[in-house]
Amino acid sequence: MTPVPAAGGGATTRVLLADDEHLIRGAIAALLDLENGIEVVAQVGRGDEVLDAVLQHRPDVAVLDIEMPGMDGLSAAEQISSHCKIVILTSLGRPGYLRRAMAAGVSGFLGKDASAEELAMAIRKVQSGGRYLDAELAAAAMAAGDSPLTERERDALQLAADGAPIARIASELHLTEGTVRNYLSSAMTKLNAQNRLEAIRTAQRMGWL
């Protein structure tokens, strides 16, 4: 698709917004549309609607909330990272989220308390091939370190957090129930948790789930 010339002579950056809070999404869209050279071409309220919207509207940059129904923003980012640049906009400053976002191909990460001008700056920077990271979140992520959980431990703990019993976790991960119990026990030990619920809460607080 041929870019539309902006008033300043450059190409217009096409933006998709994904946020389940309608008022916030609408306010961000209205503010971004006031920015020179930025056009909001699509809005969705669910994470599982992001891929279809990206394929339909071909945005240059997708701005995604992390917490959305259907699919979280980081999982949606993994689906669309080959189609457009991605900025994560979130009210949840959990340090593990930043590391997961980088692994998912995200180029920008900032809080919802950012100004419209800062968000526009982030969009322009990632569109030009750079990165834009909230300084406080970046510092917290560095201090927190990497998640101690293996991929299997994380998968088992995530399913447990969703309320799945051992039998269902085993079925979904194609493991024996004994192996699932071992993974959950190992996760509890690594997170210094007394029980499964405490392990889940710790992992969620750190953004590792």
Image (cartoon, rainbow, N blue to C red):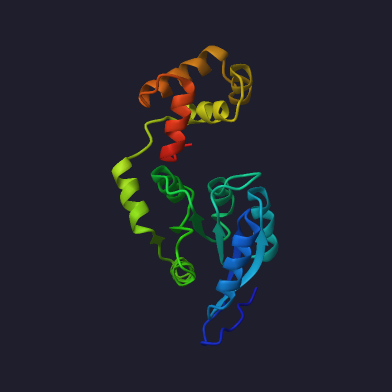
Residue 28 in the image, given as x and y percentages of width and height: 57, 66
Q: Is residue 22 above or below residue 168?
A: below
Q: Which residue reaches farthest left?
A: 143
Q: Is residue 185 left or right of residue 65?
A: left
Q: Which residue reaches farthest top?
A: 178
The residue closer to the viewer here, 201 or 152, is 201
Can residue 129 be seen? yes
**Which quadrant would the N terminus be assigned to in this image?**
bottom right
Residue 23 in the image, given as x and y percentages of width and height: 63, 61
The residue closer to the viewer here, 149 or 162, is 162
Q: Is residue 163 above or below residue 17?
A: above
Q: Is residue 67 left or right of residue 1?
A: left
Q: Is residue 164 above or below residue 77?
A: above
Which quarter of the picture shows residue 44?
A: bottom right
Can residue 208 be seen? no
Residue 142 in the image, given as x and y percentages of width and height: 30, 46
Q: Which residue is pictured at 62% across the width and 25% down the height? A: 172
Residue 170 in the image, given as x and y percentages of width and height: 59, 20
Q: Is residue 148 above or below residue 80?
A: above
Q: Which residue is pictured at 32% across the width and 41% down the height? A: 144
The residue closer to the viewer here, 165 or 24, is 24
Q: Is residue 39 left or right of residue 106?
A: right
Q: Is residue 5 left or right of residue 96?
A: right
Q: Which residue is pictured at 65% across the width and 53% down the height? A: 51
